[in-house]
Every structure is written in structure tokens, then in C-alpha cells.
Image (cartoon, coloured by chain):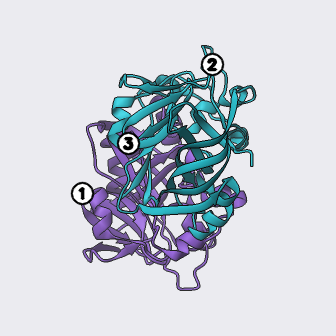
Chain colours: A purple, B cyan
Amino acid sequence: MSNLFEHSTIEVLIAAKLDGTITLEELLKHGNYGLGTFTGLDGEVIILDNDVYQVDQTGTVNHITDMSTTLPFASVHTPSINEQPLKLAKADFTLLNQAFATEKNLKNVFAAIKLHGTFNAVKVRVAPKQEKPYPSLLAVTKNQPIFDTKDVTGTIIGYYAPELFGNVTAAGWHLHFLSDDHQFGGHLLSFVGTDLEGSFEVFDGLEQHFPISDPEFRNHEIDLTTLKAAIEESEGFQD
Amino acid sequence: MSNLFEHSTIEVLIAAKLDGTITLEELLKHGNYGLGTFTGLDGEVIILDNDVYQVDQTGTVNHITDMSTTLPFASVHTPSINEQPLKLAKADFTLLNQAFATEKNLKNVFAAIKLHGTFNAVKVRVAPKQEKPYPSLLAVTKNQPIFDTKDVTGTIIGYYAPELFGNVTAAGWHLHFLSDDHQFGGHLLSFVGTDLEGSFEVFDGLEQHFPISDPEFRNHEIDLTTLKAAIEESEGFQD
């Protein structure tokens, strides 16, 4: 059985609980590819075959080898026999959200995508590191560094989540990008790529892990009335 | 790590997708205690240490040994080192939902409870078996057999789910009951018990499994606007 492993939920970031609650060492036991952020929303994390990269708020890509570094939220998986090769002659968020999602019948499942190739244009945001008292992810994303570049070779990795889980994680695609030369990356806001190759898999399920020993997680109140809109505004793409 | 394993979601029952999508054989690989229902909402299932019991619409308790029997929805777990002994001098839904939930700080986590003892009063509902074209769980529960009894010795087993997952499963407690003499059981609507003993555990997470090979599951449209209220009305208690 192949699962997407998710540590904590995007809700905790909206609720301004930004302290890390899992180490990289523990996280990598549950997957060797994935994405996330570090304590204080310190950048955008992308994990490629057990190599952990952080794009920080200056746009610099750091190779993280301290396995005691902690994350408040992360999604990882280990490729399974469900994984299929994927080639896309041209791709952007519109394609992934519409024709591709329809062709693969994604609406009620979690899925992973990896795509490598040359991108004509890429725009990313990078969450800037916050200090206590922490603000909400929603407040942070209203004033976030945005970077763009052209004609860059790199890798997209990320996940599709069904609408039914839109209170727990970002519904639709949540994608991070890293250039092959490690000079550019972040949380994808928009992209156009041609002749991309990679892989795709539909998961049998979601392994949703909670930081149950963390008093802040246990005690915090959730505002369900505004949550889904806040997640969409914080994590949405810009096509 | 201890997980609650949930096969499919209560949403599929609200959406009238009542065909079984997992066998008992497969389900029991993921837990030896739990609850669920069979194809067509055929009764209330309670699993106690790998023994599977079905309370059917006549109120009869059947010991199910055909491991090819299928379920459209089920929740199971294997007790872990998180499990703690539990004694309650007096218990009902009000206690479990209020003082107990507060004391154990349940609001943001999934948890399991097992309670054995003598119950002064127990009221259950049993979902009656449906034929195709299937109605929604919500429609079925508006006209469901209800049974009650007094001074019965038996076992409660079930799960607590946080509000955040109220689109996926029944938020709050979802409990089934089986009498020791196997003459009475079902989905608990109300109960009063004294000198109950059992166990309790908070899970590290939820392993949410989907029937991804089932075209009906993959293709069905979810009505998020009415879902949570429909789940609450279908699965709620009556204290």
C-alpha cells in the first residue's frame, strides 16, 4: 500500500503554530521525496531522493544535512509500484489542474508528481523566517518574497490533494521547484515547461501524522469558518 | 507509531456508494478492534480481538467468519503502547463529550476507547440493508430500526475524531456496542453505564485508505456544502 505521509496539517500554519514538531531524521523514515517548511516558516523545503534543500527568503538554496532540523509541516512519500512514467510536451498549472487532473481522475484521491526538464518561465514564493510571537501563514504570505526566472532546468515535485481534505491540507496541487544548478527554487506560483519527463502516482491513502506530544498543537483552537479560504489564499497558485 | 486505520470515508455513505470495497481479510491486517458496516449498509459491525460481529436490522447478532465479506466503510486499530487502562464510575455521551474529552484534551486528535461493564440503559440504531439503487446514509437513518435495553453487560468500542476531519468521518465519538451474551448491539445512540473498565488511547495519526481502484469512488462528485451536516445528522448520538 502506498501512502502520502503528512506531518501535521496546513491548519497549524494558518493557526500560527510555526515551531517544528518533527526532525528531518524522523521525517525521512517516512519518505525520500517531498516538501515542507522549517521552524518559523524558514523557507521552502524540497526533498529529492533523501537530499534536503531549503530555499531561504533571500532566494539562496541551502543543502541541509543537520538531521536534527525540525519542521512544523511536511509531506513526503517513497515511490511505490503505483508510480508510472510521465511525459508532458507542455505543462503549466492550468494543464495540471484541468486536462491532466481529468485524465488521471484525481478529484477524490491524493497523488504525487515529479517533473524534470526545461522551464520557459518559473515564478516562486519563499516563506520568510518568522520570530515569536508568530504570525499566521496567511499574514506571512501577504508580504512574501517572490522570485521569477526564465529558461531554467530543474525539478518540480509535489502533491495533489482532494477537495474533501481542503481543511487539512492545500486542495489541488501543492508544488515546489528546484533548479538543477541549485541557484533557484521555492513554492511554485506559476510555471511553463516543455518536454518534461518524470513520474506520477496515485496513493492508496494518506497517513496523516499529528504532533500529539506538543501542547500547542493539542491546545490550540481551530477556526473552521475561515480555514479553507485562508489555506487557499496562502497556498494557491497564480495562473 | 500508532494509527487509526480508516477504510474509505463516511462521505461515501452519504453519497450513497454502499458497495463494499475492502474484504474483512484485508481489513483485519490493519487492526484487530474496530467498527464498520457491510455492503448495502447491512448492519452494524463490531470487531473485538479479531472476532467480527454483525448486528443486523432485526437486532440479531451474527458472528461473521467469511473473510471475503466486504465493507464500504470501516475503522480499525491495533492497541499500541499508547493504550492506557481506563475506569469510569459513571459514563454517558455527555461525560465522554465534555468532561472526559476536556480531561484527555481530545479536540485535535483521533482516539480509541474500549469500555466493558454493566449498562443501566443502552439505545442503539442498526442500519437496515439496502438494495440498488442505493439511497444515502442520511435517508436510511431517517427510518432506521432503533433498539433499547436495560441492565445489560457488554462492551463499547469506538473512536473520537477531531472537528477538523468532520468532512471525512464523524467528528466526536463514534461508538458501537455488543452485549456479552451476543443478544444485543448496534451503533450507540445513548447509554448510561456504571463501574466501567477498559482502555483508551490517543493515536499518533490517521491512516486514511481509499478504494482507488473502484470507479464509483473515483468518479463520484462530493457535495461539500451539505456534507458535514449530513454526517452529523446520520451519525449523531441522542443524549
Residue A49: mark: 1
How crowded pointer 2 is (Cα within 10 Å; few <14, some 14-19, many 20+) is rated as some
Q: CA distance from mark 1 to mark 3?
A: 40 Å
- Which residue position holds label 2? B134
Marks 2 and 3 on same chain: yes
Q: Is residue B211 visible?
A: yes
Q: Is residue A83 left or right of residue B214?
A: left
Q: Amino acid at mark 1?
A: Asp
Q: Secondary structure at mark 1?
A: loop
Q: Residue furthest top?
A: B132
How crowded pointer 1 is (Cα within 10 Å; few <14, some 14-19, many 20+) is rated as few
- Which residue position holds label 3? B49
Q: CA distance from mark 2 to mark 1?
A: 46 Å
Marks 2 and 1 on same chain: no
In the image, residue A169 lies at what x, y percent?
A: 53, 55
Q: Amino acid at mark 2?
A: Tyr
Quarter of the picture holding the N terminus of chain B? bottom left
Please report, as a chain letter, where disc 3 is located. Answer: B
Q: Is residue B170 left or right of residue A4?
A: right
The residue positioned 66% from the left and 26% from the top of the image is: B136
Q: Amino acid at mark 3?
A: Asp
